[in-house]
Image: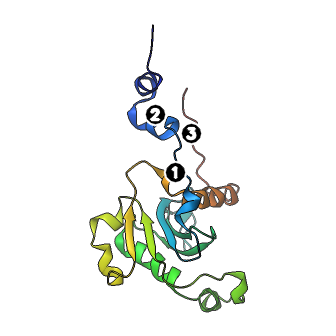
C-alpha cells in the first residue's frame, strides 16, 4: 500500500508544523545578498528573561521585546531596539534608525569606546526582508521614499530569514544563566 509521506506527517504533526520541519530545502539564503547592505533582515522576539523593577526587585515588570536588524551578507547585527511594549511599528522603526546610524557614536552615548572596524554597519540597505508583522500592516515603503524595497515572508517560515533568527538563538545561549531566564518547556513527542 502506498502512503504519501507528506500527508502522513501533516496528519501526525499538523500542517503548519509539518511544513516548517519537513518541507524540502530548495534554495540557499546566502544568495539573497551578494554584497554588504544589499539585504537587511528584521524580526522581533520576546526575550526569554523576566525583568524586575530597579526600585523594588520583588516587582516583575515583564519580558522585553527585542528587535534585530541583520545584514544578510556579513551576518552582522546592523541595528537593534528593546522595548517593554509588545512588537510594534514604533519599536521596529527604532531598530531601523539604529541600523542607519554610526555605531561608534551610538556606543559613545553609552560610555563605550569602539572604533569603526569593530562594528562597521551603518547606512541604508537596498532591501528589507521582514515577516508579516509590522512591515505588512503599515505602508513600509513610505519609510524610505521607495528607495528601499520591502519584502515579507509568509507566516511561520523563520527559515526564510535565517540570519536574523540565528542571532536570537545566539543571544538566548548567552543569557541562559542570567537570573530571571525563562526555561522553555520541552515538547512532547
State the residue at coordinates (51%, 35%). 22
State the residue at coordinates (45%, 49%). 157
> Between marks 1 and 3, how big is the CA–CA gap?
22 Å
Label at residue 185: 3
State the residue at coordinates (35%, 58%). 132
> Between marks 3 and 2, how big is the CA–CA gap?
20 Å
Disc 2 packing (10 Å; few <14; some 14–19; many ≥20):
some
Side of 45 where 154 appears, left or right: left
Q: Is residue 50 visible?
A: no
In the image, 75 versus 92, the foreground residue is 75
Disc 3 packing (10 Å; few <14; some 14–19; many ≥20):
few
Side of 1 where 88 appears, left or right: left
Viewer-nearest of discs 1 and 3: 1
> Between marks 1 and 2, how big is the CA–CA gap?
14 Å
Disc 1 packing (10 Å; few <14; some 14–19; many ≥20):
some
- Residue 103's image quarter? bottom right
Q: Which residue is mark 2?
A: 18
State the residue at coordinates (46%, 82%). 97
Residue 137 placed where, x, y %?
28, 65
Viewer-nearest of discs 3 and 2: 2
Residue at disc 2, secondary structure = helix
| Mark with earlier residue (3, 2) | 2
Amino acid at each position: 500500500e502506498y502512503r504519501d509521506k507528506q500527508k502522513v506527517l501533516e496528519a501526525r504533526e499538523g500542517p503548519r508544523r509539518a511544513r516548517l520541519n519537513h518541507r524540502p530545502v530548495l534554495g540557499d539564503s546566502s544568495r539573497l545578498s551578494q554584497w554588504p547592505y544589499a539585504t537587511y533582515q528584521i524580526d522581533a522576539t520576546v526575550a526569554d528573561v523576566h525583568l524586575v523593577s530597579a526600585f523594588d526587585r520583588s516587582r516583575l515588570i515583564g519580558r522585553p521585546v527585542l528587535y534585530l536588524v541583520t545584514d544578510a551578507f556579513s551576518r552582522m547585527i546592523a541595528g537593534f531596539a528593546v522595548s517593554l511594549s509588545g512588537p510594534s511599528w514604533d519599536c521596529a522603526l527604532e531598530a531601523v534608525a539604529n541600523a542607519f546610524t554610526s555605531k561608534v557614536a551610538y556606543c559613545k552615548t553609552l560610555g563605550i569606546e569602539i572604533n569603526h572596524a569593530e562594528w562597521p554597519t551603518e547606512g541604508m540597505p537596498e532591501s528589507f526582508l521582514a515577516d508579516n508583522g509590522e512591515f505588512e500592516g503599515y505602508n513600509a515603503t513610505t519609510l524610505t521614499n521607495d528607495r528601499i524595497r520591502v519584502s515579507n515572508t509568509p507566516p511561520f517560515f523563520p527559515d526564510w530569514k535565517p540570519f536574523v533568527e540565528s542571532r536570537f538563538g545566539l543571544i538566548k545561549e548567552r543569557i541562559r544563566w542570567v537570573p530571571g531566564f525563562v526555561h522553555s518547556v520541552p515538547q512532547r513527542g
